[in-house]
Image (cartoon, rainbow, N blue to C red):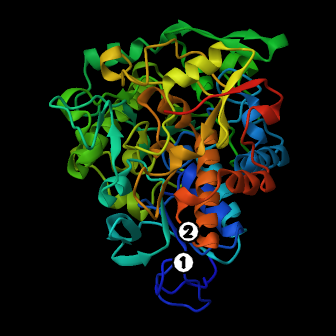
Amino acid sequence: MAVLFLGAPAAWWAWHRHPAGDTYDIVVVGAGPGGVAASLQAARMGRHVALLEPTDWIGGQMAAAGVGTMDEGSPAARKSGIYAEFVQRANALYAAQGKSAGTCYYSLDTLCVDPRDGRAILQQMLDGAPDNLNVFTATPVTAVTKTGNRVTGVDAGGRHFSSKVVIDADEYGDVLALAGATYRLGNTTSAQPAATPPCVQDITYVAVMKQYPHGVPANLTFSAPPPGYNAAVAAHFATYLKQNGYALQVKPAARKASNRLPMAFAAYSAYRGYPDSSPGSPSYDALQQNGHAIARTSLNLGNDYPLQGALSSKYITDPAYRAQAGCQAKLLTLQLAYYIQHDLGQTDWSIANDEGYATPYATQHRCASLKGYDAFQDNMAQEPYVREGRRLIGTETLTGNALVQSWNDKKALTAYADGIAVGYYSMDLHQCAAAGTLESAFDAPVDVARGGPFEVPLGTLVPQTMDGLVAAEKNISASRLANGAIREQPIAMDTGQAAGALAALAVQKRTQPRLVPAADVQAALHAAGGVTSLKSLGYSVHYGGAT
């Protein structure tokens, strides 16, 4: 990125156009969908931005964690702001290659982006930003600095980054904890931890898998089962896919297919199928040859790693255990790859060696317990897919009860005067969905198959009392159940864009984020093509209020 003009720290709002070390208007932590969108929006509004990412990939869940099958809930999600830009670039990339982006979820009306392509698109967007945006990868945050109740910067990668506003868009909500902000974890809060550790959702260590038409390389061919592989592990995988599993039921007129468990391998590969932009690779879609045409997919079904009991929340709060559990999740995916290659006889399939995951970061974070499988683990995703971390306690909280009310009332959906994003996905929890694991004041067990549309209010981004701090992506103020609907790539990018606009306006107005009028944030988002309200989409609404 280009050299920045950096602010001087004389007053938190002071802005002097002179270089002054690592001093920025805004520091964004986490280069996932929300962090990238926040950085782009703030930079485009003229603010000096540093984007910090602990891995050496950008893209978070949609790229670094390997989940490039976009969980939109509705094609309407493609019409808003920076996510719309991403969609347009992805479609243009594949159209230029004569390929379909409808290769996943058994539908031609989906957006499926190979993680390496998603990373490249996001990098192009960042490269096209103004010269006031710097990106720092392999730069983990180790501390948050404060003056009184105001966050003033972070320590990361052996450097100090001073700023007027810090945006937490990381995977775990670590910045919230380091800053001392109050937060929710599972169905507890930092102010009132429970005697029994709270339950949080499973993680998944995704791997992209591809067909090798000329044979799988020797270092990606299993010569023996991975550690711990036994009949019970194989039986678990067989509940999802097996040799004589169900084939796709294609409905050409509806442009989609259906399936049931356990799947045949072709149906399994079509579920998370990706286009293949490799030179000379075939063109296909999700339905072609009942899924048999798919040549690149991801392992993201049947390999959720459960974070249950006393170790559940420890994964979020203890970095040492986080690494240990990540290795166990990686092993589970390695066992699944073995099951496919060996037990199902898919000898021309293995983990893809051309995603670009095999970086110095991957080498440095190898699991010692998987020694002998280095080629496999180096080419897996850079980080696990984390569905749930710490969640800010904001001035407003989006709740599952509010979403259910909105979805059930087809005549008048719930709207907020300070709405800043519209989501469409269902409240999807991977484990920990029983009544005892939810927040009884906010959520009740529901049929999570239902989806939006729903609005997200501005107050979910702002701490109740702390200054200089804004939340983005899965860290915003939401109940556990509502978090299941706002953690996906499109809505995470939308709320991240709103966080960037809020932070930029706070700097511009020389005030705190909590004091920025919602109308100003909405205006900035509208100018950037963002959709902030159900009413603007033609829905009849009634105005409610987040808790």
Rate crowding at label 1 as few (under 14), some (14 to 19) or many (20 or more) other CA atoms within 10 Å.
Answer: many
> Where residue 172 appears, x then y in whole percent?
38, 47
What residue is shown at x 70% (from left), y 30% (from top)? Answer: 103
Residue 414 lies left or right of residue 374; in this view the side is: right
Which mark, residue 13? 1
Can residue 530 be seen at all in this image of the molecule? yes
Comparing 345 with 167, the one in front is: 167
What residue is shown at x 58% (from left), y 62% (from top)? Answer: 503
**Element assignment for label 2:** loop
* Count of picture labels: 2
What residue is shown at x 74% (from left), y 25% (from top)? Answer: 541
469 shown above or below 62:
below
Instruction: Residue 430: name its quadrant.
Output: top left
Instruction: Residue 238: name its quadrant.
Output: top left
Asked if marks 2 and 1 touch (Cβ < 8 Å), the reply is yes
Alpha carbon separation for disc pair 2 and 1: 7 Å
What residue is shown at x 48% (from left), y 77% (from top)? Answer: 12
Residue 166 lies left or right of residue 528; in this view the side is: left
> Where residue 125 appears, x then y in whole percent?
70, 61
Can residue 346 be seen at all in this image of the molecule? no
Comparing 508 with 197, the one in front is: 508
Comparing 229 with 520, the one in front is: 520
Q: Closer to the N terminus: mark 2 or mark 1?
A: 1
Looking at the rendered structure, the kind of residue marked 2 is: Thr
Residue 333 lies left or right of residue 316; in this view the side is: right
Which mark, residue 423? none
Comparing 425 with 341, the one in front is: 425
Instruction: Residue 19: name its quadrant.
Output: bottom right
Where is the N terminus found, in terms of image quarters? bottom right
337 shown above or below 362:
above
Looking at the rendered structure, the kind of residue marked 1 is: Trp
Q: Which residue is the site of mark 2?
A: 511
